[in-house]
């Protein structure tokens, strides 16, 4: 299953970009990173079937194990692409939120969108590591 991160704004050369790169290289599953301008731009058409996850400050908080289980279930159901959308400073519109398969949050605090990319990359790596039975992750 393709893991596709679609993010508004340019990450350029930054500490956050280094973290995204570090975790992206570790992910054994197919991974695609797409950057869009803060406003406008065309979101690429999904592979079908796909699932769409919007990163949202009011989204559901999940443990790493639950996130891994969700990705594993989608993979096992034949989902070809899991799309993770990170909005610009104003987040996502009502229509996008309503059609998403999941609103996912990293806690009640508001996080900068560049840092959310790094946090998402780390959690994607962790989830795929859990599913592979990698000994690094300590479930508890």
Image (cartoon, rainbow, N blue to C red):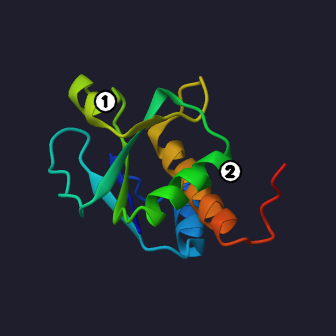
**Where on the picture, by quarter, is residue 50?**
bottom left
* Residue 81 left/right relative to 64: left
Counting the numbered discs, the total is 2
What residue does disc 1 label? 97
Give the image location of residue 129, x and y in percent. 66, 67
Give the image location of residue 10, x and y in percent. 34, 51
* Residue 75 left/right relative to 22: left
Q: How would you rate the neighbour count of disc 1 (Cα within 10 Å): few for under 14, some for 14-19, many for 20 or more?
A: some
* Residue 36 left/right relative to 65: left
Q: CA distance from mark 1 to mark 2?
A: 24 Å
Q: Which element type, helix, strand or loop, lies under badge 1?
A: helix
What residue does disc 2 label? 65
Give the residue displayed 62% in from the left and 59% down from the top. 127
Give the residue displayed 54% in from the left and 60% down from the top. 72
Res. 83 mark: none
Front disc: 1 or 2: 2
Instruction: In the rendered view, tell whether residue 25 sits above or below residue 64.
Output: below
| Quadrant holding the N terminus | bottom left
Q: Nearer the viewer, residue 12 or 31?
A: 31
Give the image location of residue 2, x and y in percent. 39, 68
Give the residue displayed 61% in from the left and 29% down from the top. 107
Give the image location of residue 65, x and y in percent. 68, 50
Q: Nearer the viewer, residue 113 or 83?
A: 83
**Where on the picture, by quarter, is residue 18?**
bottom right
Q: Which element type, helix, strand or loop, lies under badge 2?
A: helix
């Amino acid at each position: 299953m393709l893991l596709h991160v679609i993010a508004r704004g340019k990450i350029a050369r930054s500490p956050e970009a280094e973290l995204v790169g570090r975790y992206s290289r570790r992910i054994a599953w197919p991974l695609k990173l797409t950057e869009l301008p803060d406003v406008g731009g065309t979101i690429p058409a999904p592979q079908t079937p796909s699932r769409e996850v919007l990163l949202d400050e009011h989204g559901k908080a999940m443990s790493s194990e639950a996130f891994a289980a969700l990705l594993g279930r989608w993979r096992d159901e034949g989902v070809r692409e899991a799309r993770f959308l990170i909005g610009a400073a104003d987040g996502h519109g009502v229509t996008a939120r309503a059609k998403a398969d999941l609103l996912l949050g990293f806690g009640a605090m508001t996080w900068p969108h560049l840092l959310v990319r790094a946090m998402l990359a780390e959690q994607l790596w962790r989830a795929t590591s859990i599913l592979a039975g990698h000994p690094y992750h300590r479930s508890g």
